Image (cartoon, grey):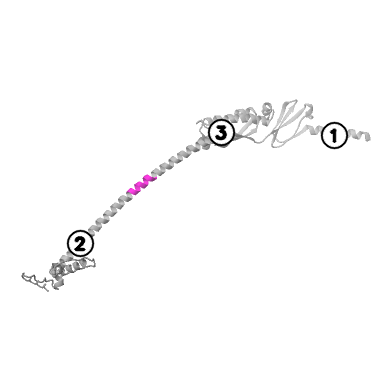
Amino acid sequence: MNQNRLPLIAGLIAFVALLVYSSIFVVNERQQAIVLRFGQIVDVKTKPGVYFKLPFGFLEADSVQMIEDRLLSFELDNIRVQVSGGKFYEVDAFLVYRITDPRKFRQTVSGDVTFAESRLRTRLDASLRSVYGLRGFEAALSDERAGMMREVREQLRPDAESLGLEITDVRIRRTDLTQEVSQQTFERMKAERLAQAEFLRARGREAAQRIKAIADRQVVEIVAEARKESEIARGEGEGERSRIFADVFSKDPDFFAFYRSMSAYATALDNTGTTMVLSPNSEFFRYFQDANGTLPPVKGSTPPVPPKPAPQ
């Protein structure tokens, strides 16, 4: 072989390799491919694999634009929405979507994800305001929240489909009061709690008064019943005492008179410091003069007849 032909052969091999390399493109499982010829879509590859195209895209022949074939998302933060009551709240949301029609996606937004998300962001903002505007703040914190998200998704679906997209999920990450509304709500809740506390205290005072009144009535009833029983017992005791004294008096009147006198002496002469001026012939001292209680005769009077002894 002529040595002069080696560079020519090497160049031919390199050209063929370059031709083959520029004619092949690979689509992986996370991508879709749009084949463009002179700026027009000629084919769309949605399955992973190795594909061929016309070489030398820089000569305005075939070129390939790769499109994402996975779930994409973006967030929308600090959206100021007004609810049905007229108050404003701040909402954070995020949206999840997928490119389902690469051809339409290329035709509408030139296959630019940033441009597509910008349009969706504007539409999501408007949908959130619309959905919140028909409800109160509590709806986003209740079971209605899932329904609100479905409603937002349905409102976004036509616009997304016009871009070749499919909305898979819309979620609310945060719903907070604005600063001024938060302060107003705090003051209102504080007033409500204070009113509730005062109501509970009033009910407590009422219950305490009722319990105290019941207790006072029970005390009066118990004391009255105790006094009644004590008076009955005292009366029965007094009656029994009188009966015993009467019985003793009937058996021995002289002893009973003697006992009463002794009791009177003990009471009258019990270290009281009392000075008594009495006649020696006083009835009070009859047992001091005579053990039988016979008083001495008074001058000029008839001597008393001694009492008869009690029958044995």
Quarter of the picture containing the C terminus is: bottom left
Which residue is rendered at x = 55% and y = 31% of the image?
81
Q: Nearer the viewer, residue 52 or 225?
A: 225
Q: Residue 14 carries which label?
A: 1
Q: Mark 3 points at which residue?
A: 150
**Can the viewer see residue 170?**
no
- 211 falls in the magenta region: yes
144 to the left or right of 13: left
Mark 2 and mark 1: span between their CA atoms?
Answer: 144 Å
Q: Nearer the viewer, residue 93 or 291?
A: 291
Estimate the x, y position of residue 273 in percent, counting from the top left: 23, 66
Per the rendered image, the range of residues in magenta is 204-213
287 to the left or right of 47: left
Q: Which of 127 and 158 is in front in this view?
A: 127
Nearer-N-terminus badge (2/3): 3
Identify the secondary structure beneath mark 2.
Answer: helix
Which residue is rendered at x = 93% and y = 34% of the image?
4
Q: In which quarter of the image is residue 105?
A: top right
Estimate the x, y position of residue 291 in percent, counting from the top left: 14, 73
Q: Name the residue under label 2.
A: 238
Q: How many labels does the image show?
A: 3
Dominant secondary structure of the residues highlighted in magenta in the image: helix
Question: Which one is in front in this view, the residue at disc 2 or the one at disc 1?
Answer: 2
**Can the viewer see residue 232?**
yes
Mark 2 and mark 3: span between their CA atoms?
Answer: 95 Å
Q: How crowded is mark 2: few (under 14 residues within 10 Å), some or many (20 or more)?
A: few
Question: Which amino acid is tagged 2?
Answer: Glu
Identify the secondary structure beneath mark 3.
Answer: helix
Estimate the x, y position of residue 281 in percent, counting from the top left: 12, 69
Q: Quadrant of residue 169?
A: top right
Q: Which of 241 and 129 is in front in this view?
A: 241
Question: Which amino acid is tagged 1?
Answer: Ala
